[in-house]
Amino acid sequence: MRSVSIATDKRYSEAEGRRRRNMVYITEDMVRRRAEHNEGEIFSLEEVSLHQQNIERIEHLEKWCRELKILYLQNNLIPRIENVGRLKMLEYLNLALNNIEAIENLEGCESLKKLDLTVNFVGRLSSVASLKHNLHLRELFLVGNPCAAFQGYRQYVVASLPQLQSLDGQEVSRSERIRAEQGLEEVRRSVRWQEEAYARRRAQEKEEARRGGAAGAEQSRAPRGRSAGWEESEEERQDREFWEKPCAFSPESRLEAHRHLEAKQKTTTLEGEPTPKTPRTLITAEGRALNLNQPKLDFCLSEDEEANSIKLDLAVYRHMDTSLLEVDVQPTYVRVTVKGKIFQLVLPAEVRPDSCSVRRSGTTGHLLLTMPRAAGEIRAATRVLAPASARSSRDLGPGPARSSRDLGPDPTRSRTSRTGGAGRYVIGREWLEADPAHRSVVDLTNIVAREGGEGGPLEGRGPLRPTDPSKGARLSEDFVDDPDVPPLM
């Protein structure tokens, strides 16, 4: 029997050690995150909400937040009121839905006006007498505690705290206070007897919890609400048996339920954890930067020829804090980190990072980067090649003379044109087709009349022939026959 007891104590010690290692403590970072309304400053904090954090101990607040007036600690796992005695300005303390079993260590809270202990495990009703020193206490909530079920509970609290104006949301009238003071000794004896009975019951519950809750735990094996052919897994069976096992509502059972849910949540998280994404490549192995727009922001890249600089207008979210932006300008690319997401853009020319300037619009929130070009930077220009026929003519050496009418505009004349959204200017040459082999002149002598056609001055005639000036025509004395002049029709 003794060996069984030793083994039980060992298992309980191991479980208690694991519980202490998994405890959630109040840290400075936790308090600072809850102090956003006070610009992250905790020394002058007057109100802080630390509810639903699974906190198991109150600590550090009386050192870090001396000016606290309102403290929310509801829905945690706090078993004891402690380390709040130096909060002299504290007016409202909310400790509802915790594991508190006694009212204590509040004598130093001189300004306390409201105390909420709803749904805890306060069984020592006589501990309310410690609140006599809190002269400004006006409201007290003890509903949902074991002591609230004691016979004479309200009469005892009203008689013990003369400064109280409201108990469990019900106003304490003057007549009720007078009646409460009558027969107080008998009520105190009754409360003392009920406290002793509750203490014995609590000792038994603690012993059962120490033994693992095996005493009197009848487990139901038949699944509820399932069809006859349904088969449950081992994990589902263990989870069902845990929740169907009868147990008393106590701090230990509440802690056990919390540990069970915590372990189940961790298992679910590990099983459903997505495969980590491969990090995006920003610079290749050859050292070439890549374009990337993870935040999906609109942008405009332009070149200022007069100032010899490149400008980037990035449409950052209007209400985003500037502290969430990081700008990194390199000679060949620019990188902007927007709330952890990377925007990277390759620049069309090399710039001077040490001379760049960054401004943000107070109206639109846009980010404007001005990046001067590097000294001696040769501006890139896209060369427009001449047509193949023109190039072949030049390669063949000198040829027949070409008039300006055949060549069109001067081939050495340049044209400046604007391209795409980047706003770059491209300088190139324009060439016209000037190959003599492709030229053709209309031969009027090949025009013939339509066969079978009717009407028209050319109908029924043969091919047109040039008129011979020596036949059937009288020429003037000063007529000169020039063969280069085309014949008259």
Image (cartoon, rainbow, N blue to C red):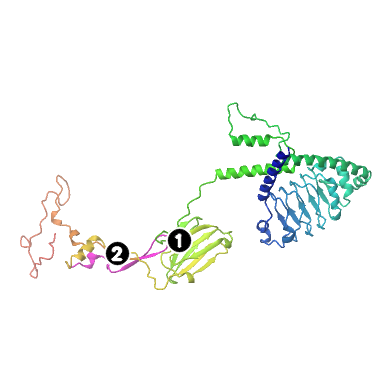
Q: Secondary structure at mark 2?
A: loop
Residue 41 in percent (x, y) is at 68, 62
Determine whether label 2 and label 1 are within 8 Å by CB: no
Tell me the distance, in whole angstroms, between the alpha carbons under discs 2 and 1.
32 Å
Q: Which label sits on residue 345?
A: 1
Residue 107 located left or right of residue 389: right
Residue at coordinates 41% horizontally, 73% vertically from top-left?
Answer: 375
Q: Is residue 165 visible?
A: no
Q: Is residue 413 magenta?
A: yes
Residue nearer the viewer, 61 or 42: 61
Q: Quadrant of the N terminus?
A: top right
Amino acid tagged 1: Leu
Q: Nearer the viewer, mark 2 or mark 1?
A: 1
Residue at coordinates 13% horizontally, 54% vertically from top-left?
Answer: 446
Disc 2 marks which residue?
Answer: 430
Q: Secondary structure at mark 1?
A: strand
Amino acid tagged 2: Glu
Of all residues, the one furthest to the bottom in this rendering is: 375
Q: Is residue 59 visible?
A: yes
Magenta region, residue range: 401-426
Mark earlier in primary sequence (2, 1): 1
- Determine which quarter of the picture holds residue 437: bottom left
Q: Quadrant of the C terminus?
A: bottom left
Residue 129 located left or right of residue 416: right
